[in-house]
């Protein structure tokens, strides 16, 4: 009736039958276990062998990623291809949606049971790297086992945390401003273009609002990626070392810029802006018809397109496009304590540099990191929305500036604090200056 | 732990358990009953020792550390009372979450209980189709906290949602309820009340336990329906009312799912739905500050324990147990 | 208010006078309409196309898209039916485990005297109070230490606790119900020579049906809807349960198959709804009609 009663538990309970006063011993047993568990795990988590089994010894590699079922199929096929070439390597594949992904990854890591190879994004890369969870890939890169020769320089550099290569880009992506082409054409309005200044963008949006009745642009003041681009155009950055790369004055200017836009009705009302502040594709105002533009990632084009009948266009964020960079849409990282780390690194190399594998994976995780293979894949692409996104990315590749440092520990909090402060200003509960001060204070304690 | 002072409800009343041994040779009963007690309790005790207690004690230990989930236990740093200090002195958003939670619980819990009891009374008696109605009223609770629910609720209480269409029939211009920081918490309350199925079922089961004869006796004494309700239903139902009150209060304060689902896990807009446990989850998992989150959890436990203890101590004045001989 | 076992066992001749059935029905239908509107909307949305779900907030689709159901059912390598079976198995075993183990514990708390009972009772209530999010990591670590995680059968960490009465909610629930059972019945049995086990078997067990049914209903439904623990402990697609599978439709940063997700959400309500309707029948007959061997 009690399947597999935990063996460790039997001991104290068994004793309790014999003694009249079981309490003290139970308590002692309990405490012993409490202390023992972490020690056991501490040992387990350290995985102390050298990670270099014989080349043909059978290996079962655990791999974990988030995404939809389309990604799952592509990835499974690519991994099957690897097994075909290396019959001794099989995979234990786990995938799920991004909801709860990092909760589970953290729990597995805490339990001393993390996957050998896992997908991670720039929100968490520094968090994991700073805690020594990820393997430093630099030596593999130097020895050529991990070939980044054909990668854009700034792309692999955007995986370096504290001088260590903590993750390798699984694909490239950059900020994209997506607009409703159909709406503009219908109303004889010009399409926005890359290189417009922020002021020009807002003026254009105001015009759109007036003519169409649909607010011209989403207010991106709560969006860290928009703020980031804007800061870089002002010669600032989101982070500098372990500090913030901006001041309260910068943020005040940013918030005031958008307060002006709201006052001129270039944007929707605060409650609609709040809807669009969600990162959810289906809530982006450009597809729900509540504004003419949305601030997203360029590679989200195909997914956005599925949610609307209207034609969409995509350009870079306003201002000098060289503030944008070849961003890793996500990375592959190897668990530091993995027994199979050499194989895991080889799998990353395969997924990035093998023609057949890259062709299989296509643009699902962003544009292929290997530029030679990217060209092949781009030519093969048939999805028109994806073609648009590739075109923008290709155009920008010429203009991309150097990549900034990977967001530091505390970045998640910084992101959510930005939303809170910006919304305080949007709902009129704080002035831009107040909201900015509040934001910077909160950031300082978040990254401390 | 404050809880150990909570009075045991099974130990009072002149005719309750304690009195029995006096009537019937204390030694023998005490021995067999004492043994039987532990025999019956053994699965729970094993569960407590093996499953429940260790994680609880670990979390208590972690609340004095800077545990961040990713660092192995062997390397966590003991920080003493720092987490607790931070909570009480340096974290305004913590206190904001406390305020949100208390407001939510004070409004949603009583209303949910009243709704549940009201509908249970309507659906108590057997008539054709009553099962269907019970099922229909339970349906909202079946949704739990699914992704679909989030989409449904947002679309009901959005600016152009169904609720505002209803209001416009009466010439009222509604608000963007879910997206309005002044109203989002109220929307959350409505959601919690809407899912009143669980206490309703418990009330229904409780009503089934009221012996029909009591109503007949009351009717013979000339009691009308209201007096029957007051003098028979309420006292006989009081253990179940008590249970629902205690549990829904605990649930109300924990209130994670609705807040998580409606705000997409953020507690927004502008922290207006940042419930205590949601704040705790964000702190522990998103920000990986599990030591601090554990401290929050233990303060929560203590606070709720005090409230529960108060309920238990007032229970003696209004909860009627059939296993007590109160005449 | 003194009752004798025979009085309780008597079938009730007539219930309270009936009020106005039509009025009651009207009130009920009105409340039901309001309460169910969001659910009807959900059903309507489950037959909308993706693009319409995002843009058309009306109750009915402009273009009827029943294809969401077939698409959702076979969306993954594993058919959605598999997730239903997994969920049903976990939920049913949880019902059995909770029913058995909590009943035993509740009987001890409600009726038996033993050392430290007050302390244990308080501890039991105390285990209800700690938010689960700080427990999941220590629990995972503990279960892994005990070898429950990563075994042949992935559901072990989800089910073992359920057979050990760790859901204090149900223990407390049953205690409250048992305390509503008149003690005279125990006394009568005791005079006939029954000990604690006999009383449990012949008095408490048969009279605990409302509590057991309630426990069954909640155990089933809550397990059916539980997301976080199932997400953490299950790792293979073919082992996933319905709530975990439902989230697979929506990866908010990229792909989102909202229509199929809605369709499967609607379908996933059916088993729980049927389970509820079937079990609530047993709530109709409570103590009024239960025969008692005293």
Image (cartoon, helix red, strand yellow):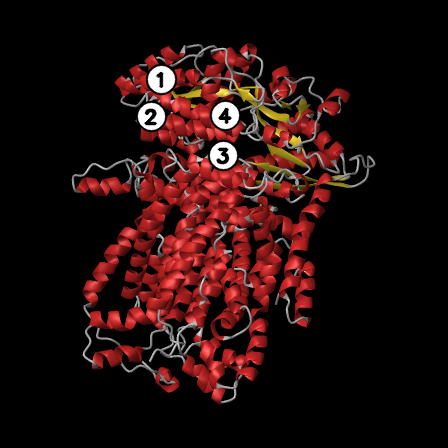
Q: Chain of mark 1?
A: A
Along the polypeptide, which appears first: circle 1 or circle 4?
1
Identify the residue under disc 4: A444
Residue plotted at (38% across, 83% down): C9
Which is more foreground, mark 4 or mark 3?
A: 4
Does residue B233 appear left or right of residue A56 in this picture? left
Residue C6 picture location, percent across and down:
37, 86
Identify the residue under disc 3: C255
Figure quadrant of residue B202: bottom left
Q: Measured along the vertical axis of the image, is residue A263 above or below residue B74?
A: above
Along the polypeptide, which appears first: circle 1 or circle 2?
1
Both marks 4 and 2 on one chain: yes
Residue plotted at (24% across, 73% down): B228
Which is more foreground, mark 3 or mark 2?
A: 2
Q: Chain of mark 4?
A: A
Q: Residue furthest toward the bottom?
A: C192
Q: Quadrant of the N terminus of chain A?
A: bottom right
Q: Measured along the vertical axis of the image, is residue B256 above or below residue C254?
A: below
Work out how far the residue at label 4 is from the one at label 3, CA to CA, in angstroms: 35 Å
- The reply to whether dot 1 and dot 2 touch (C-beta < 8 Å) is no
- Report the number of discs: 4
- The reply to whether dot 3 and dot 2 touch (C-beta < 8 Å) is no
Q: Measured along the vertical axis of the image, is residue B284 above or below residue A165?
A: below
Judged from the image, the secondary structure of the residue bearing numbered disc 4 is helix
Identify the residue under disc 2: A430
Q: Give A384 or A114, whichever is nearer the viewer.
A: A114
Identify the residue under disc 1: A256
Q: Give A293 or A426, whichever is nearer the viewer.
A: A426
């Amino acid at each position: 009736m009690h399947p597999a009663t935990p063996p460790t538990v039997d001991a104290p309970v068994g004793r309790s039958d014999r003694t009249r006063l079981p309490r003290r011993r139970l308590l002692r047993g309990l405490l012993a276990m409490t202390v023992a568990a972490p020690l056991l795990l501490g040992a387990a988590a350290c995985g102390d062998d050298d990670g270099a089994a014989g080349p043909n010894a059978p290996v079962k590699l655990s791999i974990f990623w988030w995404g939809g079922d389309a990604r799952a199929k592509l990835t499974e096929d690519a991994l099957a291809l690897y097994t075909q070439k290396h019959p001794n390597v099989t995979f234990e594949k786990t995938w799920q949606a991004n909801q709860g992904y990092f909760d589970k990854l953290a729990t597995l890591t805490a339990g001393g049971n993390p996957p050998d190879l896992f997908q991670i994004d720039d929100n968490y890369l520094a968090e994991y790297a700073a805690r020594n969870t990820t393997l430093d890939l630099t030596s593999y890169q130097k020895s050529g086992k991990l070939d980044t020769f054909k990668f854009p320089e700034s792309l692999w550099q955007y995986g370096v945390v504290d001088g260590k290569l903590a993750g390798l880009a699984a694909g490239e992506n950059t900020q994209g401003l997506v607009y409703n082409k159909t709406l503009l054409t219908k109303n004889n309005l010009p399409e926005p273009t890359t290189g417009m200044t922020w002021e020009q963008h807002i003026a254009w949006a105001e015009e759109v609002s007036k003519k169409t009745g649909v607010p011209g642009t989403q207010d991106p003041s709560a969006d860290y990626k928009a703020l980031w681009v804007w800061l870089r155009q002002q010669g600032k950055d989101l982070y500098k070392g372990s500090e913030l790369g901006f001041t309260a004055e910068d943020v005040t200017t940013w918030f005031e810029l958008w307060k002006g836009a709201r006052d001129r009705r270039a944007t929707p009302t605060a409650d609609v802006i709040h809807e669009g502040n969600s990162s959810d594709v289906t809530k982006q105002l450009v597809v729900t018809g509540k504004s003419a533009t949305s601030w997203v990632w360029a590679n989200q084009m195909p997914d956005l397109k599925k949610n609307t009948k209207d034609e969409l266009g995509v350009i870079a964020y306003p201002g000098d496009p060289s503030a944008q960079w070849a961003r890793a849409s996500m990375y592959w990282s190897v668990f530091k304590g993995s027994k199979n780390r050499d194989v895991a690194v080889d799998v990353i190399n395969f997924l990035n540099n093998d023609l057949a594998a890259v062709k299989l994976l296509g643009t699902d995780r962003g544009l292929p990191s290997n530029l030679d293979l990217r060209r092949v894949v781009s030519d093969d692409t048939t999805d028109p929305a994806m073609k648009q996104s590739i075109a923008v990315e290709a155009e920008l590749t010429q203009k991309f500036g150097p990549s900034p440092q990977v967001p530091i520990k505390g970045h998640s909090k910084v992101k959510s604090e930005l939303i809170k402060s910006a919304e305080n200003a949007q709902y009129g509960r704080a002035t831009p200056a107040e909201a900015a001060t509040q934001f910077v204070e909160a950031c300082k304690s978040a990254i401390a | 732990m404050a809880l150990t002072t909570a009075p045991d409800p099974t130990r009072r009343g002149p005719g309750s358990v304690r009195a029995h041994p006096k009537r019937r040779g204390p030694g023998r009963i005490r021995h067999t009953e004492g043994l039987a007690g532990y025999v019956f309790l053994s699965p729970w005790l094993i569960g407590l020792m093996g499953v429940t207690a260790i994680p609880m004690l670990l979390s208590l230990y972690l609340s004095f550390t800077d545990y961040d989930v990713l660092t192995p236990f062997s390397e966590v740093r003991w920080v003493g009372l720092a987490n607790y200090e931070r909570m009480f002195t340096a974290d305004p958003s913590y206190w904001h979450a406390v305020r949100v939670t208390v407001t939510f619980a004070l409004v949603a819990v009583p209303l949910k209980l009243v709704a549940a009891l009201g509908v249970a009374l309507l659906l108590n008696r057997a008539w054709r189709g009553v099962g269907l109605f019970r099922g229909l009223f339970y349906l909202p609770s079946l949704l739990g906290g699914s992704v679909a629910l989030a989409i449904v609720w947002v679309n009901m209480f959005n600016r152009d949602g169904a609720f505002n269409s209803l209001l416009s029939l009466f010439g009222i211009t509604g608000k963007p309820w879910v997206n309005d920081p002044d109203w989002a918490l109220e929307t959350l309350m409505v959601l919690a009340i809407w899912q009143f199925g669980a206490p309703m079922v418990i009330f229904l089961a409780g009503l089934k336990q009221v012996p029909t004869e009591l109503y007949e006796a009351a009717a013979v004494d000339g009691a009308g329906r209201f007096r029957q309700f007051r003098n028979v239903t309420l006292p006989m139902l009081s253990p179940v009312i008590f249970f629902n009150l205690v549990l829904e209060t605990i649930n109300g304060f924990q209130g994670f799912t609705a807040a998580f689902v409606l705000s997409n896990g953020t507690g927004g807009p502008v922290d207006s739905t940042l419930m205590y446990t949601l704040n705790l989850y964000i702190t522990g998992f998103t920000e990986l500050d599990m030591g601090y989150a554990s401290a929050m959890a233990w303060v929560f436990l203590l606070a709720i324990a005090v409230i529960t203890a108060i309920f238990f101590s007032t229970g003696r004045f209004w909860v009627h147990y059939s296993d007590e001989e109160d005449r | 208010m003194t009752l004798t076992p025979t009085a309780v066992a008597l079938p009730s001749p007539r219930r309270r006078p009936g009020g106005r059935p039509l009025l009651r029905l009207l009130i009920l239908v009105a409340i039901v309409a309001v309460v169910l509107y969001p659910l009807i909307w959900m059903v309507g949305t489950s037959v909308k196309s993706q693009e319409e779900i995002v843009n058309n907030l009306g109750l009915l689709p402009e273009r009827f898209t029943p294809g969401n159901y077939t698409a959702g059912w076979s969306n993954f390598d594993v058919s959605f039916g598999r997730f239903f079976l997994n969920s049903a198995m976990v939920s049913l075993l949880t019902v059995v485990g909770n029913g058995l183990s909590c009943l035993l514990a509740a009987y001890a708390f409600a009726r038996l005297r033993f050392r430290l009972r007050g302390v244990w009772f308080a501890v039991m209530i105390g285990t209800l109070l700690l938010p689960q999010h700080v427990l999941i990591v220590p629990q995972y670590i503990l279960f892994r230490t005990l070898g429950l995680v990563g075994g042949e059968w992935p559901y072990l960490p989800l089910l073992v606790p359920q057979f050990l009465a760790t859901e204090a909610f149900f223990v407390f629930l049953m205690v409250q119900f048992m305390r509503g059972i008149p003690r005279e019945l125990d006394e009568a049995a005791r005079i006939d020579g029954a000990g604690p086990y006999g009383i449990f078997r012949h008095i408490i067990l048969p009279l605990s049906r409302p509590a057991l049914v309630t426990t069954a209903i909640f155990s089933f439904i809550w397990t059916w809807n539980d997301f976080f623990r199932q997400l953490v402990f299950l790792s293979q697609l073919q082992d996933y349960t319905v709530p975990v599978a439902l989230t697979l439709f929506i990866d908010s940063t990229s792909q989102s198959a909202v229509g199929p997700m809605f369709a499967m959400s609607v379908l996933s309500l059916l088993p729980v709804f049927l389970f509820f309707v079937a079990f609530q029948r047993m709530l109709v007959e409570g103590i009024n009609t239960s025969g008692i061997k005293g």
